[in-house]
Image (spheres, grey):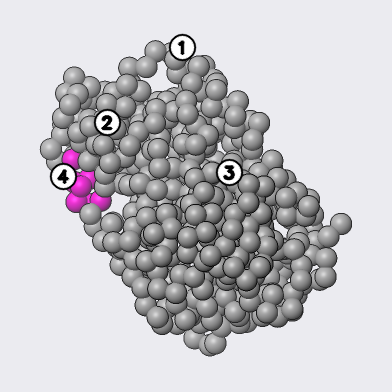
Amino acid sequence: MSRLVIVSNRVAMPNEHRAGGLAVAMRAALKEHGGMWFGWSGKRTKDASGTLHTTENGNTTYCTMDLSVEDFDHYYNGFANRTLWPLLHFRLDLVDYRRDTQDGYRRVNALFAEKLAAQLREDDIVWVHDYHMIPLAQRLRELGVGNRIGFFLHVPMPSSDLLAALPNHEVLFSSLASYDLVGFQTERDLDRFQSYVRLYIGGKAFSDGRMRTADGREFRAAVFPISIDTEHIARQAKAASTRASVQRLRESLGARVLTIGVDRLDYSKGLPDRFRAFEHFLDRYPDLHGQITYLQLAPVSRSEVPEYQALRRELEGLAGHINGRHASPDWTPLRYVNRDFSHGVLTGFYRSADIGLVTPLRDGMNLVAKEFVASQDPETPGVLVLSRFAGAAAEMKEALIVNPYDLDGVADALAQAHAMPATERKERWNALLKRLRRYDITLWRHKFLEALSG
Ligand SMILES: O=P(O)(O)OC[C@H]1O[C@H](O[C@H]2O[C@H](CO)[C@@H](O)[C@H](O)[C@H]2O)[C@H](O)[C@@H](O)[C@@H]1O
Ligand SMILES: O=c1ccn([C@@H]2O[C@H](COP(=O)(O)OP(=O)(O)O)[C@@H](O)[C@H]2O)c(=O)[nH]1
């Protein structure tokens, strides 16, 4: 059997308990096929980029590369997270385009390609992940790599007119044609990419998923919505009720209903609007004061990027304002926590909650929405309130679907969830869970790899 080579900016090392769907899926894929996980080492050095570290574990090799302080700053903090991330999340207002960071991004991708090419065997299958690595296949092809190479975009693909606002966009996005297969989270992402190829790079999109660029290169593009390890999460959630931290949370609530939000502290997650929507809820439903506690977990993310620092300050102000206005000596309506938690604990928190509040302004998928559903107690399942702009909304129609910009609408959905009869909760939850059981993370990766190998 051919080896699988996974390439992603972050590599979850064998002794690292990095949660999240991607790490779980990739570990399982590598265990099944044997192969290599290749990416950034997590180290920033004073020396030039390029030092490799190799760790063997079972049938998997972990190969990671150090980056210099400047390369990391240009490639990750700069072009990936201040230019591409806002662009791909429809936030032209936050795009900070600089030629030097774009050059850094290209340089780092070229270096990743050079180091990776030296490790590849002829029949390896290569699977590249996310916006950090868009030009990687093109660089690999230039080095003579003829292997099958697939790419999966975890974040949204925005409308073509937005993509076109990026200087040199054709150079970057036409490089996707060097992959054999390009995967998206939803049909809408694929549609928007196909329009872009037609409108801006003079290519063609065929109904069977084939695409052709103006210079004749053919590749395929298709939809593979990422999912979770549904059974594992359900088991973890059940077992978590004995954990001290989960018990402490439950005891602290008393008879109050728990609403939970879990998001990296990222502007794409719509946290300021969510906090304001919660304030609208408190204003519109004074009878429910004292009956609901909203717990927002928001681990700090990309903290060197100025837009993320500004967001953190904004949320601190909003949380203080909401509690100052509405709290009473024995009730804090909003609990705002910047720590991160392991999946073992998180799934117990989800299960303790009656309402899951997931209202990103844009999100590639949003695994939290799926994990919340998988964690529920079948006897007393919670209600998911979900933004229509999360990729997950395409598959989770039985959630209460909201527009995160409509603050009164989100407030009303919270009240509706609070008042929802047990039979309706169960009906909605059963339908959601059934789909999550059928289409889980294992099927996701099998479908992608099958399409790539075929
Ligand atoms: O690596 P970081 O900069 O710390 O960021 C964490 C990851 O965030 C993004 O996740 C996306 O992938 C999820 C799984 O497909 C999806 O559900 C979510 O909607 C996306 O935002 C990013 O795309 C990853 O590359 C980052 O590692
Ligand atoms: O304290 C935390 C907060 C989040 N997560 C995990 O981080 C992932 C977030 O994925 P999602 O797709 O929701 O958004 P992303 O952060 O990838 O944009 C989920 O698996 C969460 O369970 C976690 O393990 N601990």
Q: CA distance from mark 2 to mark 4?
A: 21 Å
Rounded to the nearest whole Å, what is the CA distance between mark 3 and mark 2?
A: 27 Å
Q: Which residue is mark 2?
A: 409
> Is residue 36 magenta-colored?
no
Count of numbered circles on the image: 4
> Do residues under tags 1 and 2 come within 8 Å of each other at their CB atoms?
no
Classify 234 as above or below 197.
above
Q: CA distance from mark 1 to mark 2?
A: 23 Å
Q: Label 4 to label 1, Cα distance in Å?
A: 37 Å
Q: Secondary structure at mark 1?
A: helix
Horizontal and vertical percent for residue 119? 75, 75
Q: Which mark is residue 423?
A: 1
Q: Are marks 4 and 3 in contact (CB under 8 Å)?
A: no
Please give left or right for residue 432 compared with residue 77 in the image: right
Residue 86 point in image, percent of width and height: 38, 60
First in sequence: mark 1 vs mark 2: 2
Please identify, in this view, whether the residue under mark 3 or under mark 1 is nearer the observer.
3
Of the two numbered discs 3 and 1 on the same chain, state the one appearing first in sequence.
Answer: 3
Of residue 454 and residue 384, the one placed in the foreground of this image is: 454
Magenta residue span: 315-322
Numbered badge on residue 225? 3
Where disc 3 sits, the SS reads loop
Residue positioned 18% across, 19% down in the render: 287
Mark 1, other Cα within 10 Å: few <14 / some 14–19 / many ≥20: few
**At which x and y percent is residue 66?**
57, 77
- Point out the tag, 4 or 1, that comes first from the N-terminus: 4
